Each structure stands twice: as C-alpha cells, then as structure tokens.
Amino acid sequence: MTKTADKVRNYVKENRGLCIFTAVTAFLMFLSIVWVYHVKVLNAPKVYSDGFGYFLYLPAVIHGDFSFAFIEGWEHPFELKEVVGGMIDKYPVGVAILESPFFFLAHVVCLIKDALTGSMTATGYTNLYQYMILFGGVFYWIVGTVLLYKVLEKYLGFSGKVSLLTCIVITYGTNLFHYASYDAGFSHVYSYFLFNLFLYYLCWYESRETEGINKLWHTCVFGLLAGLIFLCRNTNVVFVITYILYGVRDWETLKKRFLTILKPRRAVPIVLTGIVTLLPQLLYWHAATGHWLVYSYGADEPFYWLAPQIGNFLFSVRKGLFFWSPVLLLAIVGIFMAYKRRKQLYTGLVVFLLLIVYISSAWWCWYYAGAFGQRVAVDFMCLFAVFIACVFDRLEQMGQNGSGVRRKLLSGLVYGYCGVCIVWNLWCMTAYWYRVLPTDEADWDTIRAIVGMIR
C-alpha cells in the first residue's frame, strides 16, 4: 500500500501540470452535467437519441429481455430497426461494454435503496443510471487524455509543455468537452479513449519489439482493442491502419513492415482475438435475426461512395469540421511541418485521416443529425493532437534558438489564434446548451444569433 501511495505521489509530482489540468477539467465537466441536467433542468432525459440506443443493451441484461419490450413504459421513445430476419437495435454493443461498470454500480446502489425504502428505482433508466453514464464519460476522457499526453511526451518526444498545451487546446477548443460531459452517452468519448489507448499501446509494444521481449498475450491485445473500436463505431476500425503502417516512411519500409506484421506469430493471435472480441455482437445479431453478419442500419441508411460530401463535411456552416472547430486547422499546418521527419505514426495517421474523412462524408447523413459541431471527429481527436503538437513544438524550438521578432510574432499569432478559437468554441457550446444553436440546420442567421448573445 505504501509503495502504491509513493508511486502515485511521484507520478503527480512528475506530471503536476497534467494532473491539475485533468482534475480542474473533470470538475468543470461534473459541474456542467449537474448544471445542465439538475439546476437548469432540461426537459429531456440525460441518455437519449443515439446514446439511448448504445446504452439499451445494459437494462436489457437486468431485465433479461433483448427484444427491449420493457422500454414501453419509459419516457424515451425508441424504434428497433427492421432488417432481414427480424427487428434489432441498430447500434453496436461496444459503448455498452465500456459503460457497464458505471451502470452496474448504479444498479447495486438502486437495489440497496429499494430494499431499504421500498421504492422502485432499479429499472435501469432512473436518474442515477443516467448520471453514472455521464460521469463515466468524464472518466474515459481523463484516462484517454492521460494516454494521449503520454503518447506525445514519452513516445513522440514532445516536451511536457507542448504535450499539455495540445491536450488543453483539443479539449477546450473543440467539441470534445461537450461530448465528454453533456452528451457523454454518445459513442464519441469512448472512441476517443480507445483510439488513444490503441496509439499508446502500439508505441509501447513496438518499443519492446525491438528488444524481443513481447509475449503472445501482448500481441493479442491488438485484436482486443481493434474489436472494441469496431464495436463502438464500426467504421472506426480503419484506425488499424496506424498499426499496419507504423514506422513506414517509404516503399522499402512498407515492404519490411508487411513482412513483419504478416508473420503467423503476429497475425494469427490478433485475428483470433479480434473475432472473440466480436462475439457479443455476433451472438446478438444471430439471436435476433438468425444471421451472424448483419448491416444493422438497413438499406435506407446507405453510404454514397461515389458522391461523398467532403466539402460540406469539412467546411459547411451546417456541420463543417473546420467551421465549428477552426483550431483544428493547425493540424493541417502540422502535417506539412512533420513531413520531413515522418516519425513512427506519421504515415498511418495521414492515411487514416484521408480514409475517415472520405468514409464519414460518404454516409447518407454526413452532418450526423442532431449534434454540436462535427461530432464524429471527436473519435479521432488524437490525430489532430499529434499534428497540432508539431506546430507548438516548432514554436518552442524557435524560442530555444533565439528570441527574434519573427518568433515572437509567429508565437503571438498562433497562441492568439488558439485563444480566440477556445473562447469561440466555449461560447458556441453554451449557445448549444441554451438552444440558441440548434441541434441541426445551423446557418448564418444562427451565427448572428450566437454573436448576439454577447450583448
């Protein structure tokens, strides 16, 4: 116990800035959840819309009913999706798996309360369950952010200052804060956590592989993580390209990498573990439809592969990624800055960015319905973080080489831009919470209304 306490103290001492940042931000997230849903009292459930669909597997467990008939008496409407063979919940099970510790903790508390008071709160959807899901989102933001910081600082060689500043910027300058608190029931903060965990584990594993000290189960973890990423949001499985292209800089390193990862001792354990991880989803599909593989979104929710809305996805006032999170434009600058050095993750992250933008914008609902900003980008915020850190790192290097006017001007412009973007993002987030910014169909009149809140 003493050794553990000493380790914690040493960690806090060595990472004081990170600990203060995560503690303060987590407190603000908790405060925001309580303010929005308890003090302000939104006339809506806390776990709703897509978040309700992801969550629904958990109350199904305690009710023993995966036809979901028990929700008829609940305040939240929900329609199952008709597919070949039956009716199913179209949302995958991964989010529910990650939410389960918080759900079952709430369930135990509700059972005890009901036994002591005779009340009926252990239904799976009363207030405590919903609050615990949102608090779980804060937990996954904390762990995911610590992992991201470690990837930047320990494995990519950025300074602690650059790594911390990057984490601050992506948390407060984008919709990440919102989806780790107000809308933590959605899949995005869980994918954010899994992506960061995957990157951290990839860097950790490859650093040990050169010494030949990895064991079989270390390799199997890749299958587990890839499976969980797929189970949270199916299209995100393309993130495994970062594993495939790790360390690739040119044609020769690409061939060498393929020879390495296709060795049976690496490929077979990963594939088998991945299949085992998918079993909960496969078993549910088979039980509900008689088929092992199902496109759960149905024919009326297709991908338009030949007509992706890339321009709208990135720049439109409705839901453009860079329109609503302009601080992420720094990452595009960082991609070009990092090209010559091309560290271990560079090629994989750039290829993934191209793939995920194409896939996401080809979805029939490229704006992803009711949302604050382009919500799917929260999942792969680590990608932007790596390249934003490249910009901050260049500014830091310029400062070490001298304090010229050019460096001061450039630093002032970049950090000033970040500050303006953070203020703008937080203002828009507040407008969204107060329904000034609608969940969809934002236009230039919406922008004028948001600016009008300043008066």
Image (cartoon, rainbow, N blue to C red):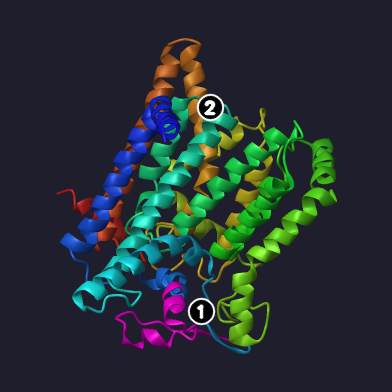
Q: Earlier in the sequence, mark 2 or mark 1?
A: 1
**Can residue 410 be found in the magenta stretch?**
no
At x 56% / y 61%, what residue is drawn? Answer: 360
- Relative height, residue 373 to residue 160 (above, below): below
In magenta segment, residue 69: yes
For disc 1, the neighbor class at 10 Å (few under 14, some 14 to 19, many from 20) is: many
Q: Which residue is mark 2?
A: 158
Residue 195 lies, in percent from the top left, at 55, 50
Instruction: Give the number of the disc on residue 89.
Output: 1
For image coordinates 19% across by 62% down, the residue present is 38
For the residues bearing labels 2 and 1, Cβ distance under 8 angstroms: no
Query: Depth-wise, is mark 2 or mark 1 nearer the camera?
Result: 1
Question: Where does the magenta region start and end?
Answer: 58-83
For image coordinates 43% across by 23% down, the residue present is 410
Q: Amino acid at mark 2?
A: Phe
Hey, what amino acid is under mark 1? Asp
Give the quarter of the image for residue 415.
top left
Callout 2: SS: loop
Q: Is residue 47 left or right of residue 44?
A: right
Residue 48 at what x, y percent from top left?
36, 71
